[in-house]
Image (tube, grey):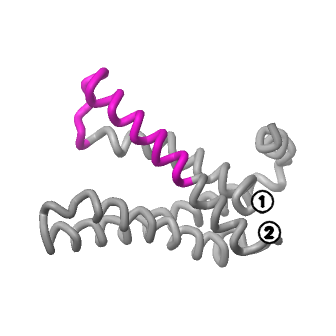
Amino acid sequence: MDVLKQLKSINKDNWKQVLWQFIKFGLVGVSNTLVSTGIYYIFIWINKDLYFWGNAVGWVISVFNSFFWNNIFVFKNSQMGFFKKLLRTYIAYGGSFLLGSVLIVLQVRVIGVSEWLAPWINLVITIPINFILNKFWAFKA
């Protein structure tokens, strides 16, 4: 797999740069969380029955937020076209959203993890996966 080959090719000098990118990626992730949660709460403030739409709209807008900031702040040296990066960003985040959804069901229903704790456990898994997918595939930085 191309991503694995690229990961193996990172030398000791490049690890500092990759770590710094990961930290910046995390900062962008915090802003995504604020955006999606804010939109979600606005929808349920308007009408509690709109929770599904609030979650969906929040996800769509927060992924665009991620794309915007990752494009100019984290992976700014990417030479790939705008729309190709945007589509790949949505695919990468969509994959991690599906993975997180499966994991949360397994954790809560099968393992018995608290529904309040499970999403935070998932972040330990989905954040590195999202970083790798965005760095080596969506932005090819």
Question: Which label belongs to residue 80?
Answer: 2
Q: What element carries label 1?
A: loop
Give me the residue at 75% from left, 53% from top.
136
Give the magenta range: 93-116
Question: Which label belongs to residue 140?
Answer: 1
Spot occupied by residue 92 in the image (x, y as percentages of width and height) = 60, 52
Q: Label 1: few (<14), some or many (≥20) within 10 Å?
A: some
Q: Does the magenta stretch include residue 103?
A: yes
Q: How many labels does the image show?
A: 2
- For marks 1 and 2, the one nearer the N-term is 2
Three-letter residue code for mark 2: Met
Res 100 quadrant in image? top left
Between 123 and 138, the residue placed more toward the observer is: 138
Q: Label 2: few (<14), some or many (≥20) within 10 Å?
A: few
Q: What element carries label 2?
A: loop
Between 63 and 122, the residue placed more toward the observer is: 63
Q: In which quarter of the image is the C terminus?
A: bottom right
Q: Do the residues labelled 1 and 2 touch (CB within 8 Å)?
A: yes
Relative side of 93 to 47, left or right? right
